[in-house]
Image (spheres, rainbow, N blue to C red):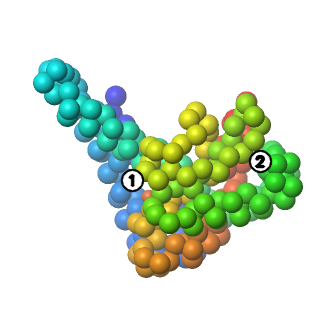
Amino acid sequence: MQYQEKKFTIPKLKGISAESIKQHLGLYAGYVKNFNAMTALAGELMKDSEKNAPAIAELMRRRSFEFGGMRLHELYFPQFEGGPKALSRDSMLGQVLKQQYNDSDYCLEEMRHVAGMRGPGWALLYFDQEAKQFLVGWSSEQHIGHFATLPIIVALDVWEHAFVLDYGAAGKGKYIDAFFENLNWSVCERRFADTQK
Ligand SMILES: [Fe+2]
């Protein structure tokens, strides 16, 4: 099965330019395309799996990187759709965040801290239904560092391509502020509600 590039309706954002979003969407499209191409190539290489074993091993590792890039961006871009909306303290997400952090803003402090770490990657807010708690995580590459099986509630891309056009190489902090300014929390509230079904 071939994966299809999804389309997103992203409004004008504060502090993140349309050009930056356009280039970023182009990178996302590349992940979809590369994943499909690698899947097709793997099928070919498997026809002589013994001879092609080293190439298959490398391809399998790189293919999951492309898949992670595809899916994480499919979580990232919809968070801007519909325009910014504050977290509702009365929503299920708002209430459970408050139980864990006392003040629901605390998860933002943790998210900001993790997102601001040196190096490219993703700051991710997961929810572990088994332990009934949120976990903030860091994926340095798209497929590495995840809490396996846990759904992602907030996905913050802090690869340089997300901010360098608008803020320069040292502008990650300003971009993180802009991300939260533009975040439509109702998207994250829906994701959390889905974990409770
Ligand atoms: Fe990205």
Given residues 192 and 53, the one toward you in this image is 53
Residue 187 x %, y %: 65, 51
Task: Say which quarter of the image contains residue 151.
Answer: top right
Q: Secondary structure at mark 1?
A: helix
Check the picture and name the quadrant holding the N terminus. top left
Q: Which mark is residue 98?
A: none
Residue 181 located left or right of residue 25: right
Residue 106 x %, y %: 77, 60
In the image, what residue type sits under mark 2? Leu
Position of 5 relative to 120 (above/below): above
Residue at (43% x, 67% y) in the render: 160
Residue 66 at least partly seen: yes
Quarter holding ligand 1: bottom left
**Which residue matches tag 1?**
28
Residue 6 at least partly seen: no
Residue at (68% x, 46% y) in the render: 135
Residue labelled 1 has its Cβ within 8 Å of some atom of ligand 1: yes
Q: Secondary structure at mark 2?
A: helix
Residue 29 x %, y %: 35, 51
Residue 111 x %, y %: 65, 59
**Which residue matches tag 2?**
93
